[in-house]
Image (cartoon, helix red, strand yellow):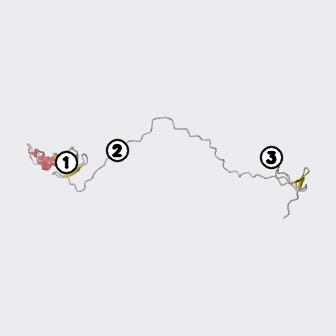
């Protein structure tokens, strides 16, 4: 391989000094080997293709919310219902679990006049028991409704209605 012949610069034999930074940036490469060599064309810088839609400017500024009362969540109350399978309330006390005092108790029963007592009274009145005999159903517990209560906390645990 043949190397380039040495150039003569200012009376000394050797190679030409490299171009400075400004020369390379402004004029392109410098060729010193002859007058007939044309310099290369200047570089062509292409523009990026433009989008048909305008690019959004990031000028939107989010401001903090206006001062006001603090936002609080509403208080939710949850009620738990215990279903006791197989418990049938009748006219006798029953062994059940009280949900208020969380104990297993034997219910206390209370009798109150209900629909059956009133119908029996009306029936006796129609058949002629006008002079007080029609009030007998209000004295008989087997014709009244039964309310079962807890003996500890008096919570109503169940009701047995005759009709």
Which is nearer the N-term, disc 2 or disc 1?
A: 2
Q: In which quarter of the image is the N terminus?
A: bottom right
Q: Residue furthest front?
A: 12
- Marks 3 & 1, CB-CB < 8 Å contact: no
- Select label 3 or label 1 by which is in front: 3
Callout 2: SS: loop
Label 3 crowding class (10 Å Cα cut-off): few <14, some 14-19, many 20+? few
Query: Where residue 64 sits in the image (x, y, percent)?
Result: 53, 38
Q: Which of 115 and 99 is in front in this view?
A: 99
Query: Where residue 88 sits in the image (x, y, percent)?
Result: 20, 54
- Select label 2 or label 1 by which is in front: 2
Mark 2, residue position: 77
Judge whether 106 appears above or below 65 on screen: below
Callout 1: SS: strand
Query: Where residue 90 sits in the image (x, y, percent)?
Result: 18, 52
Q: Nearer the viewer, residue 163 or 65?
A: 65
Distance of label 3 from label 1 (alpha carbons): 106 Å
Q: Nearer the viewer, residue 159 or 46?
A: 46
Which is nearer the N-term, disc 3 or disc 1?
A: 3
Label 1 crowding class (10 Å Cα cut-off): few <14, some 14-19, many 20+? many
Distance of label 2 from label 1 (alpha carbons): 27 Å
Q: Which residue lies furthest to the bottom in this view?
A: 1
Q: Would you say 113 lies left or right of 37 here?
A: left
Distance of label 3 from label 2 (alpha carbons): 81 Å
Callout 3: SS: helix
Query: Where residue 16 sits in the image (x, y, percent)?
Result: 86, 52
Q: Would you say 140 lies left or right of 43 here?
A: left
Q: Which mark is residue 148?
A: 1
Mark 3, residue position: 22
Q: Nearer the viewer, residue 36 or 68?
A: 36
């Amino acid at each position: 391989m043949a190397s380039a012949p040495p150039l003569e610069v200012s009376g000394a034999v050797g190679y030409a000094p490299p171009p400075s930074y400004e020369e390379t940036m402004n004029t392109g490469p410098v060729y010193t080997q002859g007058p007939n060599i044309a310099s290369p064309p200047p570089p062509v810088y292409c523009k990026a293709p433009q989008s048909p839609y305008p690019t959004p400017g990031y000028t939107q500024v989010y401001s903090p919310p206006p001062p006001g009362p603090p936002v609080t969540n509403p208080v939710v109350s949850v009620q738990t219902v215990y279903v006791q399978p197989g418990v049938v309330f009748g006219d006798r006390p029953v062994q059940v679990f009280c949900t208020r005092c969380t104990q297993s108790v034997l219910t206390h029963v209370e009798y109150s006049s209900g629909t059956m007592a009133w119908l029996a009274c009306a029936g006796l009145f129609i058949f002629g028991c006008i002079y007080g005999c029609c009030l007998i159903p209000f004295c008989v517990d087997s014709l009244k409704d039964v309310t079962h209560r807890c003996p500890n906390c008096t919570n109503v645990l169940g009701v047995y209605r005759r009709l």
